[in-house]
Each structure stands twice: as structure tokens, then as C-alpha cells.
Amino acid sequence: MSEFQLVMPKMGESIAEATIIKWLKNEGDVIAIDETVLEIATDKVDSEVPSPKAGILLKKLYKDGDVIAVNMPIAIIQLAGSASAAPALPVVQAPNIVAKIEATVHTAINTVIPVTGVAGGNKFYSPLVLNIAREENVSMSELETIPGSGNEGRVTKRDILTFVSNRAGGIAQPVAAPVSMPAAISTPMIESPKTVTPADPAAVTSVSGGDEIIEMDRMRKLIADHMVMSKHTSPHVTSFVEADVTNMVLWREKNKKAFEKREGEKITFTPLFIECVARAIKDYPMINCSVSGTNIIKKKNINIGMAAALPSGNLIVPVIKNADTMNLIGITKSVNDLANRARANQLKPDDISGGTFTITNVGGFGNLMGTPIINQPQVAIMATGVIKKKPAVMETEFGDVIAIRHMMFLSLSYDHRVVDGSLGGSFLRRVADYMEQWDVNRES
């Protein structure tokens, strides 16, 4: 029988695992080339997984809600035209197939994960958890003692980060209950008796009769994990400057109608901000970095993410790729396209991957300024505040005068492991300088 393994696709540079939302095909169903087999989700975007080959879905290796490492097998497909045509036969009852899949999963674990992902023969750790363990010098014996709060006792990012935080603070660590399982490797295809490691008890919260309990949706849970991880990973520092953006406001007011008529696109302040940020990054390229262990990765491309609010209230960060190579028209078209598709939940994995720097507009909610959380694995994120008319002192050839100007606060949160106050402050000041020097007479 000719078989094909459908694997969990890699969804971006910083994404090591994904959650199965829903299987769209059942075992025994016929699958055409490029037909969607299941829906998956990461902390950034939902997506569909198509089959690159035609055939019959022979076996699902995981169920809805399971979290799977990228590049791991998730289904077995019997290819079209193969000898066997009996999809109804239970795969688990065929010892030769079980042995083959066991060997494949064991090989995949040892291939994808440099450090063994199976402890004591019965506990799987995702590549992300193992990477954190290596960076924080958590031994395998220590890893085995961490109680897992994930599916079937799986150790999650939050579990290991909590362990590391508690260890650094000298807090005694809980010891996981012993797990009783056979010595053979545990695979998703074989039912075997198991004792699930108990998760840490949740903190008791007082609830009165008038309170409403609202469970986080899936995306909010993923965002929460990502934000907590970022705070655990990067020592955050925030700097502020106030910029006079009067020239920007006057230029946009003068050109927005003609721009929309000519290009068929509305121009907001976001493309103007992105152009200034891209120019400043070229002046200070060390702000365009990420960290891998003790190595600093200086990024060649300038890919600027823009935080966008969704109708659900959640946030997503689509990315303007190679923003420094675009003119203002190109940036505007990209911004509008990504924002519209974000609101329609039509973004693709590539649209939210590869970002090297992020901008978030807290001014859109009437806020003066904010202290944003870094979007890992980047090292900096800038927030733009509301634009307000204020009296300001201006220097003229006839002396200082007080005039009404359009002013805006900029704030930059940066990873102090890589970006010190000199670099962070100088970069932010340079962004403000480009905004203030905007040519009010430039062509649109």
C-alpha cells in the first residue's frame, strides 16, 4: 500500500506549534489534490491545511484541540491508485502499519528536535518547550518534574516559563506525580493506559452574584500566552518623545481627496508613519534585530508589522514586507489591503510572518501614549499616540513665538538585552525628526 504522511506545516519563523481546530475530512474520505483536510490555528492566524496529493484519508493521528509541533505527521493518506482500497479497515488493528507509523514518529521526533523530546519513554515535549529549556539551562530531569497544564498533561510554554521564573526567585518547585505507562514510545495512534499529570490549581477568585464569567476565546488565550512569554523573555524599557506632526496633518488634508480619486485608496496616517520608521531603521539597523540564545540576528529586510484590531476585540499583526523599498503609494495599498483582509479574517500565514519591527496606534482609541509589549522575537515596538492641537513654542527669525501645532507622543518599548537607552532613544528621536521634517509640498 502506498502511503503519504501529511505533516503540520511551518507557519512562520517564530511559530513552533499549532492547534487543530477542526478536521474537515473523516477517515475513509476521498481527498483531491490541494483539497483542505483540516483547519489549524497559531497565536497569530487561523489557516487551512490542504493535501498535496490525492487519495483516501487512512488515519487521523490527532484529534480536535491537540497541539502539534511543526513538521510532525498529523495524518496518513493512502495515495490514489494504490493496491488497497479498503479504507474502512481500522488502521490500529494492522500491526505492520502501527509499527511503521511508530518508527516514523520516533524518527521525526529525533530529526526535528535536537534534544530528545521523550522523557522516560512516555512524555512528549514540543520543540518550543525544549528550546526554552536549553536557553534557560533546564535539565531533562528538571523538565520531567514540571506539572503540565496542556492536553493530557503536556508541558506548555507557560508551564516552563513559570518554572524558570519561580526557580530564579528561589521558590520551591512542585513535583509532578509519577506517570504510569509502558516503556515503549507513546504515539497518537495507539491507545495505552496513562495517568495524566495534575495541573497547578487555579487561583481562587471571589465571584459575587452579579458578576459575569466569560471564558477567553481561543485567540485571546493564545495572545495571553504570547504576551506573558514576551515579558518573561525580554527586559522591557520604554522611551518617549513628543513630535510636531503639523506638516503631516496639513499635507494629508491637502492631498487625501486627490489621492483617493487617482489611486482608489484612502490614505491614513499609518503609511506616513511606516515610511518614517523605515527610514529611521536604515539609519539605526541594530533596532531591526532578533535574539537567538546569546546571538543577535541583524535582519537584512525591513518588514514592518502593524497591529490591527479585529471585530472580536482581539489584535493581529499583518506585515508590510520590504517597506523601505516601497513608495508611499505602495505602502498605502499594502496597509489598506492587509487591514481589510484582517477585518474579514482572510489573512494568510505569510501575511503575518517575518516581521522585524512593529507599530501599534494607541492614538486610534484617543490615548496620548502607551507602553506596548514587544512582539517576539523582535526587539522593539513603537506606539503612536493621538494627534492633538496644542500651544507650542516655535523658534523664528524674529524670535520665539507661541503657535497652535499638531502634537503627538511616540513611545518605544525595546529589549534591553540588545537595545540600550542610547540606541533606543536615538532611534525614536530620528523617527520624530522625519515626521517633523515632512515636506508639506511633496507630491502625493
Image (cartoon, grey):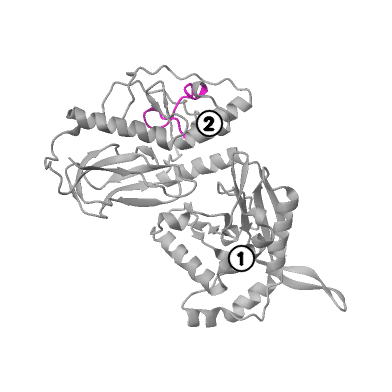
10 Å crowding of disc 1: few (<14), some (14-19), many (20+): some
- The residue sitting at 39% across, 61% down in the picture is 344
The answer to whether residue 8 shows anywhere in this view is yes
The residue beneath circle 2 is 133
Q: Residue furthest right?
A: 399
The residue beneath circle 1 is 273
Residue 360, numbered circle: none
Residue 265, placed above or below residue 186 = below
- In-image side of 196 versus 339 (left or right): left
10 Å crowding of disc 2: few (<14), some (14-19), many (20+): some
The answer to whether residue 310 shows anywhere in this view is no
Q: Position of residue 29 (x, y in %)?
A: 17, 46
- In-image side of 194 versus 338 (left or right): left
Please state the extent of the stretch shown in magenta in the rendering: 142-158
Q: Position of residue 221 (x, y in %)?
A: 45, 42
- The residue sitting at 43% across, 65% down in the picture is 340
Q: Is residue 152 magenta?
A: yes
* Element type at mark 1: helix
Report, in whole angstroms, how far the alpha carbon at label 1 lies from the one at label 2: 38 Å
- Number of numbered tags placed on the structure image: 2
Residue type at mark 1? Phe
Q: Is residue 295 magenta?
A: no
* Element type at mark 2: helix
- In-image side of 377 versus 49 (left or right): right
**Toward which corner of the image does residue 245 lie, by quadrant?**
bottom right
Q: Mark 1–mark 2 contact, CB under 8 Å?
A: no
